[in-house]
Image: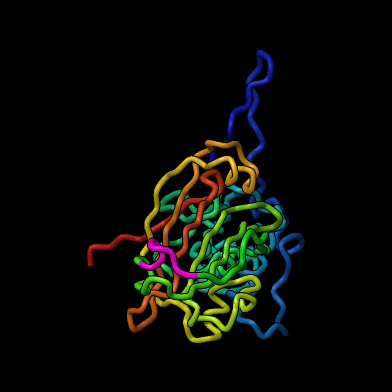
């Protein structure tokens, strides 16, 4: 890994590289695998890594030692280490590059190949999700909502507008609309909309998403603690049940300085 260069006065000095796993003194700082723990060894090691990353002991850009070194240090198989790393890579916490090893991801990556909620994405990364409510109300469908949700004019819907937060940092402004038959009432949604929909059997299993770059308006910028006009990412999602009925229309405005959206493409 190449260290960055910092200029100070007339001299040139190497900037300190992010702390690596090797610099954490192995088990002493990262933690230990406990034989009495009923969780699989790969899950235990993944938890240790996740905690070190979320607590800042492993900084963004930090490099992990080779799998064989980690396996020897912790007395487990390379398959165990590989599976733990794969789990964190799928959650966006680690980045694996051929020939360059594994490093701690510098930005949050949301995988477009899976349908999941904001709460699930943040929890998987070891962050604490929360919301600041803007609006939670029932009403009649608008023409745009009716088209997206395939509803008749005047059909009842429920709207959930909020700022999505992770570890006290605002990440997105989210505007969601669902048909009223999907929930018992607006109070069903306390944190995760998908969790509430799952309880009534209306969690979407498929979604169509569209992403485009937008400048934040003044009100959006204030909610996200950025300057007005700052580039952001707008994601429009329409979620569907297994029988094809649309049950969710959401517009989410994400901070562009914290998010990468990743999609896996194949030619199968």
Question: Can you give x and y, in whole percent of width and height, for residue 196 in the image?
Answer: 57, 79
Q: Please say whether residue 144 is one of the residues in the magenta stretch.
A: yes
Q: Quadrant of the N terminus?
A: top right
- Taking the view exactly as shown, the residue that stands out farthest to the front is 154
**Residue 227 vertical position relative to residue 157 in the rendered view, above or below:** above
Question: Can you give x and y, in whole percent of width and height, for residue 127 in the image?
Answer: 65, 62
Q: Is residue 248 visible?
A: yes
**Residue 10 vertical position relative to residue 212 in the rendered view, above or below:** above
In screen coordinates, is 109 left or right of 137? left
**Residue 217 vertical position relative to residue 183 in the rendered view, above or below:** above
Question: Can you give x and y, in whole percent of width and height, for residue 104 in the image?
Answer: 57, 53
Q: How many marks?
A: 0
Question: Can you give x and y, in whole percent of width and height, for residue 68 in the image?
Answer: 54, 63
Determine which quarter of the picture holds residue 239: bottom left
Relative depth, front residue between 56 and 190: 190
User: Which residue corresponds to the image point at 72% horizontal and 57% vertical from the top-left?
Assistant: 55
Q: Please say whether residue 177 is one of the residues in the magenta stretch.
A: no
User: Which residue corresponds to the image point at 54% horizontal and 67% vertical from the top-left?
Assistant: 159
User: Which residue corresponds to the image point at 53% horizontal and 38% vertical from the top-left?
Assistant: 230
Stretch in magenta: 140-146
In screen coordinates, is 79 left or right of 267? right
- Taking the view exactly as shown, the residue that stands out farthest to the top is 10
Which color mode does the image show? rainbow
Relative depth, front residue between 70 and 89: 89
Relative depth, front residue between 82 and 186: 186
**Residue 267 vertical position relative to residue 21 in the rendered view, above or below:** below
Q: Is residue 78 visible?
A: no
Determine which quarter of the picture holds residue 35: bottom right
């Amino acid at each position: 890994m190449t260290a960055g260069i910092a200029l100070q006065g007339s001299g040139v000095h190497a900037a300190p590289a992010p702390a690596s796993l090797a610099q954490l003194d192995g088990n002493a700082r990262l933690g230990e695998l406990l034989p009495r723990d009923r969780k699989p060894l790969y899950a235990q090691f993944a938890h240790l890594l996740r905690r070190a990353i979320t607590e800042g002991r492993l900084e963004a850009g930090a490099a992990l030692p080779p799998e064989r070194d980690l396996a020897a240090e912790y007395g487990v198989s390379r398959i165990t280490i590989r599976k733990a790393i794969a789990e964190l890579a799928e959650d966006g916490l680690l980045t694996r590059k051929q020939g360059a090893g594994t490093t701690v991801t510098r930005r949050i990556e949301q995988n477009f190949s899976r349908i999941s909620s904001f709460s699930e994405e943040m929890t998987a990364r070891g962050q604490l999700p929360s919301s600041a409510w803007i609006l939670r109300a029932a009403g009649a469908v608008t023409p745009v909502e009716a088209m997206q949700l395939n509803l008749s004019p005047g059909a009842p819907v429920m709207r959930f507008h909020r700022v999505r937060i992770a570890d006290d940092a605002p990440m997105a402004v989210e505007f969601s609309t669902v048909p009223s038959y999907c929930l018992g009432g607006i109070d069903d949604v306390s944190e995760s909309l998908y969790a509430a929909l799952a309880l009534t059997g209306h969690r979407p299993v498929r979604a169509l998403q569209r992403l485009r770059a937008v400048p934040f308006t003044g009100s959006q910028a204030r909610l996200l603690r950025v300057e007005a006009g700052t580039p952001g990412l707008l994601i429009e999602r329409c979620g569907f049940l297994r029988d094809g009925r649309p049950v969710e229309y959401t517009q989410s405005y994400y901070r562009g300085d914290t998010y990468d959206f990743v999609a896996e493409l194949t030619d199968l």
